[in-house]
Image (cartoon, rainbow, N blue to C red):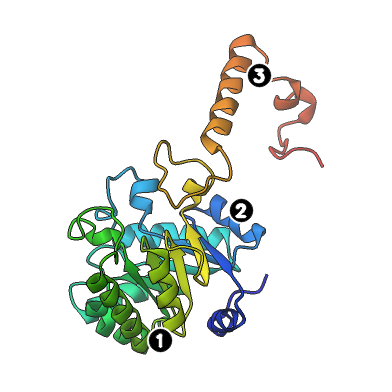
Amino acid sequence: MARLRLDQLRNWKFKGHRWVCLTAYDAPTARILESSGVPMILVGDSLGNVVLGHESTVPVTIEDMIHHCSAVRRGAPETFVVADMPFLAAQVNDDEAIRNAGLLIQEGSADAVKVEGGGVRAETIRRIVEAGIPTMGHLGLTPQNATQLGGYRVQGNTPESAKRIIQDALALEKAGAFALVLECVPAALAAQVCSQVGIPVIGIGAGREVDAQVLVFHDLVGLSGDFKPRFVRRYAQGEEVFRSAVSSFIEDVSSGGFPGDSESFIERDGENAEMAPEA
């Protein structure tokens, strides 16, 4: 699968071709997504909640993002990878933002970065893009400042806030963003944004009238415990599958059924026996 190009995204929007983006934080997940034909992987700072056990994305550092992004690249060498700019990576000043974005490209092997925030981030995005780094915007519910937004709530549900989101979307497009994530906004507003900008709009909790959909992989496959936002559809019950496998392993070990002869090395294998299974 050839790696996605930015001109393809605009062409897909023009043709009405809908596509998907999924998160990954490690090589095995990335390998699954690439082999499934997912065109874009987001290494989100949601890794703070999903795999590091934090209560929010705020504790995630640029070093965390580089570490996980590098793992994803190793698992999906041919997929377009977008890396989140974590909390304070883009907020201190534009020079620091460019440096951090560059680290995600150089050391994390990402193809692009994502920056949360509205019009206030437009100049920062413009500077990062001018430095040669493709940049995605993120509007609506922006988890890094969820406290300021009153928690994890739907955004843009008043005339004033809806107008601001539209203005922010236009500002980020003008600044050079190649796409926008629009999170937790009314479906009608998302459709309006999508029709007014010429760049792809990737929705999460933003209805169906957008160009693409993104979900957290762990939510999609049922690895998020009791956490299930309204906008998530679970396509598998992963935790149940894994619990069943672990329970079976415990039972086999307790009964003496594991390991069997096929999982054991015997004398005829010799000192240089391969660990890999026989062809």
Asked if marks 2 and 1 touch (Cβ < 8 Å), the reply is: no
The span from disc 2 to disc 3 (Cα, nearest Å) is 28 Å
Q: Secondary structure at mark 3?
A: loop
Q: Secondary structure at mark 2?
A: helix
**Residue sitting at x 46%, y 53%:** 216
Q: Nearer the viewer, residue 148 or 75?
A: 148
Quadrant showing the N terminus: bottom right
Q: Name the image quarter holding residue 191.
A: bottom left
Mark 2 surroundings: few (<14), some (14-19) or many (≥20) residues within 10 A: some
Q: Is residue 220 above or below residue 65?
A: above
Residue 187 sits in quarter: bottom left
Name the disc covering residue 258, or none.
3
Q: CA distance from mark 1 to mark 3?
A: 55 Å
Which amino acid type is marked by label 2?
Ile
Q: Is residue 108 visible?
A: no
| Cα separation between marks 2 and 1 | 30 Å
Amino acid type shown at disc 1:
Gly
Residue hosting label 2: 32
Residue at 56%, 64% in the rendered image: 20
Secondary structure, mark 1, is loop
What is the crowding at mark 3: few (fewer than 14 residues within 10 Å), some, or many (at least 20)?
A: some
Q: Are marks 2 and 3 in contact (CB under 8 Å)?
A: no
- Of callouts 2 and 3, which one flags the residue occurring earlier in the amino acid sequence? 2
Quadrant of the rendered image containing residue 258: top right
